[in-house]
Amino acid sequence: MSKIRRLISVVVLNEHGVLSRISGLFSGRGYNIDSLTVAPIPDTEFSRLSIVTSGDGKVLEQIVKQLHKLIPIYKVIENGDFVEKEMALVKISLSENLSGLDAVLKSYNGSVANSDDKNLIIMACDDSIRIDSFIKTMKKYNPIDIVRSGSVMLEM
């Protein structure tokens, strides 16, 4: 049976222990979380969890059913049409050959996020497949370090 990548957006009451209960639901049943991003929803008492997971259809159905049973979950959206983005930060040395970097940045919604006398920190924001490609492309600049965010998503 093939694994299906699933995006799940969960709105929860912003209180102590909620994240622990949700991660416990996944780990206790042997489900894997590929990406988890949590942030408060401005001017509310809620937070949004953006979860990327994968499994067969039956496993994914079970995950969603279990999420609905958890308190204090306000809303679970798992069949939505989402806009999904990830971010990557890449540190490269200024001593590297940086030819072509401008074209790479334009191709991947990238920019120079910061620099000092030794290094550049490059940032790109795009969908997960494009961030995969961006990171592969940046390897030619011999990155010192790479950090990748989890997915953030919002339903249409």
Image: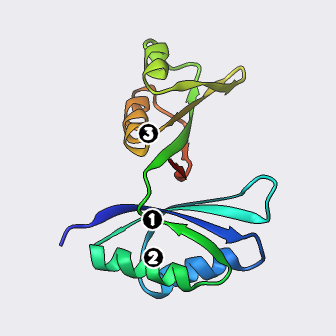
* Total labels drawn: 3
* Residue lying at 52% horizontally and 79% vertically, measured from the top left: 67
User: In the picture provided, is 143 more to the left or to the right than 75?
Assistant: left
Identify the image quadrant of residue 128: top left
Q: CA distance from mark 1 to mark 2?
A: 7 Å
What residue is disc 1 on?
78
User: In the rendered structure, which amino acid carries the disc numbered 3?
Assistant: Ile
Mark number for residue 131?
3
Residue 133 visible? The answer is yes
Q: Residues within 10 Å of mark 3 (few under 14, many from 20)?
A: many
Residue 75: % across, % down = 59, 70
Residue type, label 1: Glu
Reply above or below: 139 against 29.
above
Q: Residues within 10 Å of mark 2 (few under 14, many from 20)?
A: some
Q: Check whether the beta carbons of the residues at disc 1 and disc 3 lie within 8 A of each other.
A: no
Which quarter of the rendering shows the N terminus? Answer: bottom left
Residue at left offset 82%, top offset 54%: 43
Under circle 1, the secondary element is loop
Q: Nearer the viewer, mark 2 or mark 3?
A: 2
Q: Secondary structure at mark 2?
A: helix
| Numbered tag placed on residue 64 in the rendering | 2
Task: State which tag comes first along the sequence, 2 or 3.
Answer: 2
The amino acid at mark 2 is: Val
Tag on residue 30?
none
